Amino acid sequence: MFVLYEEDGAFKAGTILADNDATLQVENTHGKRVKLKRANVLLEFRDPGPSDLLARAEAAADELDIEFLWEVCGDEEFAYADFAAEYQGHTPTAVESAAILLRLHSAPIWFHRKGKGRFRKAPADILQAALAGLEKKRQQAAAIEHMRAELVAGRLPAELAALLPQALYRPDRNRPEIKALEAACVDSGLSAARLLLKCGALASSYDFHYNRFLFQNFPEGPDFPAFEPPVTPADLPRAEVAAFSIDDASTTEIDDAFSVTPRPEGGWRIGIHIAAPALGFARGSGLDAIARRRLSTVYMPGNKITMLPDEVVQGFTLAEGRDCPAVSLYLDVTPGLAIVAEHSRVEMVPIVANLRHHDIEPVFNDETVHTGLADFPWKQELSLLWDLATVLEAGRGKAGGNEDRIDFGFSVDWNIDTADGPGHVSISRRLRGSPMDKLVAELMIYANMTWGKLLDASGIPGLYRAQGGGKVRMTTVAAPHEGLGVDCYAWSSSPLRRYVDLVNQWQIISVLQGTPPAFAPKSADLMAALRDFELTYAEYAEFQRGMERYWCLRWLRQHGRGEVEATVLRENVVRLTEVPLVFRVPSMPLQLPGSRVRLHVEHTDLLDVEVEARFVAILAEPEARDFSEAGFGFA
């Protein structure tokens, strides 16, 4: 005697070895012995054999028309055996009964299970909904297969083209387009970014990194929304000075300028002039909302995303040949460079020159300031400001020689195409701490310190940079900055580029003009702006470092560099000599920090922004001095 039973959702057949009324000992077709409750037995039969029954029943079930079975079935719950007898018109054989059972069980959309061997036909409305859903899934599966095949063949499906940013940077794995992309990645052995680059969805690896930053930080795009134009300040006094700025060639947001005016009683009046966009629009305006959303200009090699619209920048930048609204700090300096008086005012400042680093540095540099300056325009003013900067630096307790570190400048010519996409990068080297750097830095430090003290003394809140115990933080309280050696330091010298500086400028202007401040004491909005700025500014800085790393790899590929020289920073971490690229070299034997080594570049990856290099030789041991290379930490 044989039985058909269900176990773990599957139908099985076996031979009865012992019948104990309530239970049966059964040996299934695989030779396994099981104990069954009689209630779990669906069919007892004598022929054919268990294996033959299942094979023949499955074949017969495939021939049964499920739609016909549904139509001829009654609406009430039924046992499969009764339905088999009714369907066959005679007492069904074991194969016929099993075929009906298997067919009903395989069509849960058409027949709902109500117990062991018992079913009920699905109501017509529920059936139609289920069939529609099944058809939708079938069509979706076909669409996924079509998109997968297109991607594997190197073509971008139109459906996926509309979802590119999400597909790359925040994929919804429930969408069919993403399922197709993931399947194509498995079939091709490529990551999503590499596969889409191959399909032409990305113009270059640069687009992958830049578009990811936009997706995460500028989901509406880098373009500015509509805004009310700023108000041109009226009735401001005109300063009797001839001011000039000092910036690199790419600077368009010129925030600061200087003036040197002789005093009748001897000495000079030194002017530090800061562009004043805070005069053009108020807190709560549309332009404020734009600046509050962006919080800072985003810098990267070959590109930038400004905090303020170009029209606003051009209206307030300290461009030569015009009078510009500014907040000015004047220092009365004796012939011995002692500061005997200082005062601030809001005014129109005539800008007579925009000096650029590449023009001035050849004649005004670390060598010429000590050996004697040649004649050139602005020689006297720059020399005086350099001497004053040296005094200010010593006054902070920071006097010393120029820092022996290199700053790298990146420029990208987008008109030149390379094998890796548009853009030909040039990377220049410049010694940090040049006279121009120190001149500008010291005067800005002094202005930010002075205006920070002004706000604190006036009881007007501001945003400060403070440092204690080696930790730098933003705060609304005037606290010392130990690293700079000042009592307080309020960022206020770059209002065209940083929201913190713009906020502080509103507050400074309120003190100077005697008007209510934009942010009252204990303002929750001021604290929120501080928190948001810190987070956003850090994200922007991380992106800038990442893009500089990317362009370093482009530079290596562009110049076909195989062997390169590097300096060991620590363990197996090195920094290349020609470009500021820091990476690990696992094959390098342990070297002293500061050692110079030769490496062979094996591979560069522009999507993962990684470089693989092999150690070749040691070139030189470190000299007996500090090679900590602060500022060039591992990226």
Image (cartoon, rainbow, N blue to C red):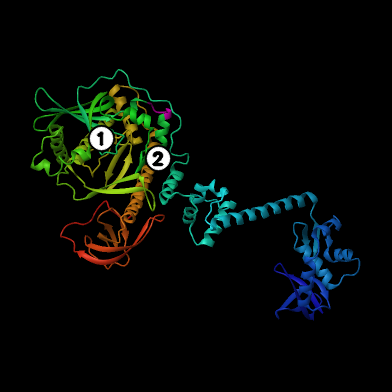
* Predominant secondary structure, magenta span: loop
What residue did someone put label 2 on?
A: 532
**Spot occupied by residue 76 in the image (x, y as percentages of width and height):** 85, 56
Answer few, some or many: residues within 10 Å of disc 1's Cα (few below 14, many 20 plus, some between 14 and 19).
many
Q: Is residue 463 above or below residue 37?
A: above
Residue in the image at 10% along x and 37% along y? 374
* Residue toward you, 31 or 580: 580
Q: Can residue 1 be seen?
A: yes
**Rounded to the nearest whole Å, what is the CA distance between mark 2 and mark 1?**
21 Å
What residue did someone put label 1 on?
A: 448
Q: Is residue 334 left or right of residue 604?
A: left
Residue in the image at 34% along x and 32% along y? 502
- Outermost residue, top side: 235
**Spot occupied by residue 43 in the image (x, y as percentages of width and height):** 81, 72
Answer few, some or many: residues within 10 Å of disc 2's Cα (few below 14, many 20 plus, some between 14 and 19).
some
What is the count of numbered marks? 2
Q: Is residue 420 above or below residue 459?
A: below
Does residue 564 belong to the magenta stretch? no
Q: Which residues are magenta?
A: 281-286
Element type at mark 2: helix
Q: Is residue 181 left or right of residue 226?
A: right
Looking at numbered disc 1 in the image, what kind of residue is underneath it?
Answer: Asn
Looking at numbered disc 2 in the image, what kind of residue is underneath it?
Answer: Asp
In which quadrant will I find the N terminus? bottom right
Q: Name the quadrant containing residue 567.
A: bottom left
